[in-house]
Image (cartoon, rainbow, N blue to C red):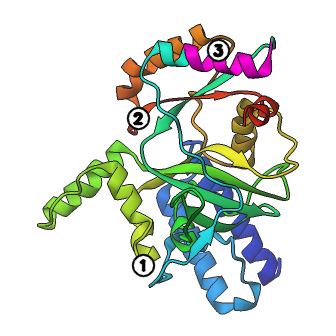
Amino acid sequence: MNIEQQIQSLRDELREHNYKYYVLDQPSITDFEFDMKLKELQKLEAEHPEFHDPTSPTLRVGGMVTKNFETVAHEHRMYSLENSYSKEDLEDWEKRIQRILGDVEVQFTCELKYDGASISLTYEEGQLVRAVTRGDGFQGDDVTNNIKTIKSVPLQLKGDYPPKFDIRGEIILTLDGFAKMNQERIEAGEDPYMNPRNTASGSLKLQDSALVAQRPLECLLYSIAGTNLGISSQFEVLEKARSWGFKVPSVAKLCKSMEEVMQFADHWDVHRHNLPYETDGVVVKVNSIQHQEELG
C-alpha cells in the first residue's frame, strides 16, 4: 500500500468510526485507539500536503481562526414556524388546508422542536461546502470552519444523495455535555453558562475553531431544500437524511389524522423531560411535498 492509499484508508476508517460513535452511538473501538489513528493520519498529512482533502477527519480538531464572519445569502429561504397553543388552532389549520387542497387525504409528520441554534448546511457532490446561520431567514453568517469541528456533521456523505442540496438543522448541547462544561468552568473559577441554547448559539461565532472543537456540540437535522431532489414527503426526507449519514432523531411520527397529531404532542409534553437535550414543543408539517407547494 503506497502513502496515498494509506492516507485514504485511514480517512475512510476514521470516518466510519466517527459515524458509529457520534451518529449511531455505537462505538466499535476505544477513544484511545481512535486518537492514535487520528494522530497517525495528522502526521502523514503533514508530511504529504499534496494529498490534501477538504473532508479529512483531521479537520475536526479545528485550528482555523475567523476574525469576521462573512454574510451569505441563503439560496433557499429559511422560514420561521407559526406558533399554536391549542387543539382548536390545529383544527382550524387543518380546515384551511382542506379548503385549499379539496377532498384529499392529508397526512402530517410530527417532530420535536430542538432548542438550539438553526443552521443550513450546503452539500455538493456529497461534500460539505458551506455552513450558514439562520440570520434573518434570507441571509446569515458563514460559520463553516466552526461547523466542521462538530463530529455529528458529516463532511463526506454516504449512499445515494442528490448532487446539490441544503439541509437544515439545529446545533444543540446535550444536557450532560452542558453540565460538564459548567462544572469545568466552576472549577476554573469562572461563571457558569446560563443555558444550553444560548451557549450553543454563541459557540458558532467563536473566532477560534479549536475552541469550538472542545465543546460537546451536536447537530440534529430535520429538513432539506433544493431542486429535483426526488423526494416526495417530509417523512422520506428524514429517512433519506439518516441514510446519508446525518444525525436524525428517531422520534418523528407519520400521523394520518389530527387526533394522532394531538396524541404525539400530549405524549412528548410529558416525556420530553426524559430526552438528553432540551426541546421547545412539537413541529407539525404537512407530509406531502406536493401539498406543501400547493399550500405555499
Residue name at image x 75 percent, y 68 percent: 9
Disc marking residue 95: 3
Residue underneath mark 2 = 280
Q: Amino acid at mark 1?
A: Asp
State the mark number for residue 208. Answer: 1
- Mark 1–mark 2 distance (CA, rounded to whole Å): 30 Å
Q: Report how far apart the C-alphas of labels 2 and 3 lie in the structure.
A: 25 Å
- Count of marks placed on residues: 3
Query: Label 3 sits on what residue type?
Result: Lys
Q: Is residue 148 above or below residue 54?
A: above
Query: For this rendering, which residue is in front, 117 or 4?
Result: 117
- CB within 8 Å, label 1 to label 2: no
What's the residue at 88%, 49% (across, down)? 228
Residue 89 coordinates in the image, percent (x, y)? 50, 18
Magenta span of residues: 91-102
User: Please, what is the three-letter code of the amino acid marked with disc 2?
Assistant: Asp
Mark 3: give few (<14), some (14-19) or many (20+) Cα within 10 Å: few
